[in-house]
Amino acid sequence: MIKIALMVLLSLSICLSVASTTALAQIVVIVNPANPYSDISKKELSKIFKQKRKTWKNKGVIHVVQLPKEHPLREEFSKKVLKMSSEALEKYYFKKALSGKGQPPKILSSPSEVKSYVSGNENAIGYIDASDVDTSVKILKVDGKDHIE
């Protein structure tokens, strides 16, 4: 009986730890340091991630990278920027692909992979937790703020 109670308490503490880590995450949008942009509106960012805007003003094709739909940062980003759940976003991308109006963005398995891809591609855009940022990428401010609110 004591073992079961301890297992339940351990499980709850792990769940609370994961939930609090996600709640404390500060999502930042990142681009390659060579990208001339320094700020973007949330509305424009939404257009990019919904594939309604496909090129930068310098005519470079935007390479959007996403985290897997199960990743907590993706869920938070989707809700705050795109105003939809990760699941709804998957359906949105599927419909666009079926209609011939676009392919889903590249899905990378971790924030470190997103950072690596963006650092090596001048036209890429993605998002990670602020704590993962280093000099290999540049934070793209959203409505004048470093992180997404």
Image: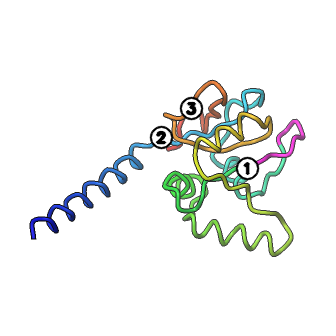
Q: Which residue is mark 3?
A: 133
The segment highlighted magenta reads 56-64
- The residue tagged 2 is 26
Q: Secondary structure at mark 3?
A: loop
* Mark-to-mark CA distance, 3 and 2: 11 Å
What residue would you read off at disc 1? 64
Task: Measuring from the top left, give residue 113's x and y in whole percent.
Answer: 64, 44
Label 1, residues with CA under 10 Å away: few <14, some 14-19, many ≥20: many
Residue drawn at (82%, 63%) of the image: 102
User: The disc labelled 2 sits on which kind of residue?
Assistant: Gln
Could you tell me how many numbered marks the image carries? Answer: 3
User: For residue 23, which numbered disc appears in the image?
Assistant: none
Image position, residue 115 (x, y; %):
64, 38
Callout 1: SS = strand
User: Given the image, on which type of amino acid does mark 1 rest?
Assistant: Val
Is residue 99 located in the magenta-colored stretch of the structure?
no
Residue 142 horizontal side relative to residue 94, left or right: left
Inspect the image, locate mark 3, and give the three-letter code of the amino acid beneath it: Val
Q: CA distance from mark 3 to mark 1?
A: 18 Å
Mark 3 or mark 1: name the one nearer the start of the chain.
Answer: 1
